[in-house]
Image (cartoon, rainbow, N blue to C red):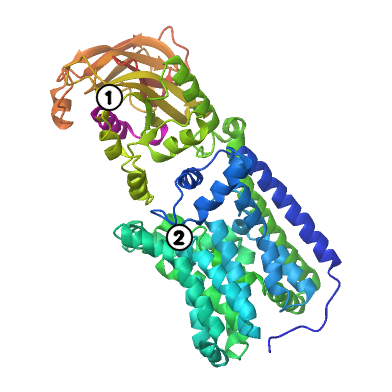
Amino acid sequence: MRNQQSSDNSPNSTLQLFAIGFTVIFLVKLFFAFTLDLYSDEIFYWQASTYPAIAYSDLPFMAALLTGIGNIIFGNHAIAIRSLFLILGSAIPFLVLWIARPLLPKRQALQAAALSLCLPLCGFLGLLAVPDVPLLFFGLVFIGAFERATRTGLTKYWIAAGIAAALGVSTHYRFAPYLVAAFIYLLAFGSMHKYWRAAGLWLAALILLIGLYPTLSFNFSNDLSGIDYHLLERHPWEFQAEGLLHTLKQAVLVTPLLYLALLYTLYRLCVAARAGDTSKGLFACFALCNLGVYLILAPWTDSTRTSIHWPLSGYLPLVIFLPETLFVLKEYLANRFNKQIAQRFLVATVLIGFAGSIVAITGLGTQVFHKQLRAILGEGVLSNKMAGWKDFSEHVQSLIVEQEIGPEEIIVSDNYYTAAQLALALPDKREIYNIDQDKALRDGRAVQYQLWQRNSAALAALPQVSGLFITEDSTMTVTDKIEILQRACDQFPELTYLSELSLLSGDKRFSFYRGNQTSASTNVNSCPKPTLGWLDLPAPDAHIESTIEVSGWVINEGLGVSRIDVMLDEQLIAEANYGIARPDVATAMNVQDDLNAPNLGFNATIDTDSLPKGQAIFSIRVVGVSGEIQYFGNRTVFIQ
């Protein structure tokens, strides 16, 4: 029999605290889910929903299905696409309560539900339309149904477990640890061996196989591309010392006191399981499999993602018995020290965890207040991945009207998520392509765009190409952009620079080009590639007395350079002399098509008498023949 506490203290106060905590977190998530622009993963799953399929290159169908349903019901808005994820993520505490209620007194079950809100990554769930939300939702449903099935033997629970498992494997490849944990549990405990002969278990397995069909079908039809990506391509499979910090990172993310309490809970579950407690053994299996696989593989796998949110699936089974652990720790501290210290430990553990949940949500939500916070925090601190897309889409719509880009013309982007943002935002739903050969490949989505015929190969197959080409400059180096522009020029016979859009104080920048079907130019340098440059003088932190000596070089293997301006605190102070012989640069940089080579250098001598004294920011502004303007060489100087 499973352990069941006989006493059932009044749950009213616990219920009130749970209701308050849940309401606060839900309202904060709702606000940011409504105001934040869509993240690159979210917009990809939305785009996938417009191409209905049972599986996609990186995942099965569940994430795309949920985003698509939300979009159909509520419209083209971020909160609509996130709506079902917000519901599922917010339901996690209630699933914890559902799992705990048959095993624990009502008050303790409510405490477990409340404590799930204190796991920062759990409180965060549902803010974004990402597959981790349904993965954890179906994972908890599977644990609850499987626990009931093995406790009661009732067929209805085996069916429920099979359905939850089928939905889980239709969500993500990372549902596998749940299945491994259930398999180990049925093997490890002798009292569970009887179920290997029960019809319910095999009925659940049959339902699971149905859920595996989409993944297996896609992989067998596409050279195992999904499996290759998740098991091979996304991971270096070489030892990385950073992976040894996995435990430390998790302690910070979970909050230290709560992390130690969860580890102690796991230890107590394992001790109880060795003593024959099959109930606690079940939860120990699910926790160990989900935590252990990421701990063991951390030094060899994708350190960015495996060390952040994946282990959450291992903490949630422990939350069920976390109240019991905290009570034991409180009693120990009371006996070892005094009741006041014990109470402070308990309060600190809960409050720091809950505060961590609020910080996790608002930390991502700071992008909503990018302009205000940037003035306080400075440049390069805040992420802009979920900010600026509305302004960007409105600018593109106005540019389409201004440039008279007809509905039969196309839009091409340098990356898949910019193209997907436009696919959602533009009312005319015109043909949109991307020539992304880098990020799409890293994210396991290159095969999908090939299947959708929205990549560079599909673009090249079009008989005539004209329209708008867009680059997101803030995500690229100049070298990257030169390569991207060359790809674009291979697709468009004629490419003309139009303008630049700078958002969020320059943290998010785009360039726009008009692509035409035919070109009258026979010049091999007709592609409007950006300028690559270097500033030799002045040196960083230079102290300047009478004159500023300026020198450096620029390379433009496109249309060439029109003018080089010298800037001080973003104000023009002189125009540099361009065309000085620099054969060393032409040789070292392997310049091929710059018509000005080897005369690639520039210089200027500027009298400081008329300049303001003190610290200033020095930079160079290069104006290309295409009209594109670039800045480089930002340096702090001190004019004395």
Quadrant of res 33: top right
Residue drawn at point x = 53 percent, y = 82 percent: 201
Element under label 1? loop
Residue 580 on image: x %, y %: 19, 15
Query: Who comes first in sequence, dot 1 or dot 2?
Result: 2
Q: Is residue 636 left or right of residue 16?
A: left
Residue nearest the observer in this picture, 23 or 245: 23
x and y percentages locating residue 139 in the rendered image? 56, 67
Q: What residue appears at the point 38 percent right and 21 percent down from the top-left corner?
A: 619
Residue 549 in view: yes
Amino acid marked by disc 1: Lys
Q: Quadrant of the C terminus?
A: top left
Q: Where residue 220 sits: x, y (%)?
A: 32, 62
Magenta span: 474-490
**Residue position for label 2:** 306
Give the residue number, with chain letter if any, for mark 1: 529
CA neighbours of label 2 inside 10 A, class few (<14), some (14 to 19), many (20+): some
